[in-house]
Amino acid sequence: MEYNILLVEDEEAFHILIPNFLARVKKHTFTVHSALNGEEGVEMYSKLANEGQKPDLVLMDLRMPVMDGVEATKRIIEKDPKTNCYLFTAYAGTEAERDVLKAGAKGTISKGTDWNRTVEEIVNILESVGQRTE
């Protein structure tokens, strides 16, 4: 299956790591679109949706310049309440995480040190979403 992912993250290393680790998954193909802050993420989501490439998953960092993950999540969910937006953060269990979940994020993927586990979690989410839409 082919999946579109929007990664909204201000640390550029993640824009290299995630596609590299996803490329190791042989049963699916992933296209990862990048935004370096929340404002770019909202704009990119709209652009992709308008071009018929709506992301199957949005990975949203919490703390970013220009616009944080809470506000960006609110804006994306306002445009498309069915968006599969997940908080992608090292700040799980914080009040800010609760704010993003209240804004409509479906859950949290922790920025752990085990990248294989992180990718497995991303794939599991995408596969469960794909089964619901088939």
Image (spheres, rainbow, N blue to C red):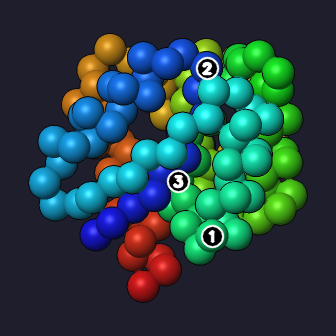
Where residue 11 appears, x then y in whole percent? Answer: 54, 16
* Quadrant of the image occupied by residue 9: top right
**Quadrant assignment, res 46:** bottom right
In the rendered view, tell whether residue 26 sits above or below residue 86.
below
Could you tell me which secondary element the residue under label 3 belongs to? strand
**Disc 1 target residue:** 51
Q: Quadrant of residue 14?
A: top left
Classed neighbour count for the residue bearing mark 3: other residues with Cα under 10 Å, few (<14), some (14–19), many (≥20): many
Viewer can see residue 92: no
The kind of residue tagged 1 is Glu
Q: Residue at x 69, y 58 (%)?
A: 47
The residue pinned by badge 3 equals 57
Q: Nearer the viewer, residue 34 or 117?
A: 34
Q: How far, Cα to Cα, is label 1 from label 2?
A: 24 Å
Answer with mark 1 or mark 3, whichever residue precedes in sequence.
Answer: 1
Mark 1 or mark 2: which comes first in sequence?
2
> Is 37 or 68 nearer to us in this picture?
37
Q: The residue under label 2 is which amino acid type?
A: Asp
User: Which tag, 3 or 2, sits closer to the chain's start?
Assistant: 2
| Residue marked by disc 2 | 10
Q: Is residue 23 visible?
A: yes
Label 1: few (<14), some or many (≥20) within 10 Å? few
Query: Quadrant where the N terminus lies?
Result: bottom left
Image coordinates for residue 130, horizontal then vertical, percent: 41, 71
Quarter of the C terminus within the rendering: bottom left
How far from the left and from the top, in percent, is residue 109? 49, 34
The residues tagged by marks 1 and 3 sit, at their Cα atoms, a distance apart of 16 Å
Spatial CA span between label 3 and label 2: 17 Å
Left or right? Give the position of 87 relative to 69: left
Q: Amino acid at mark 3?
A: Leu
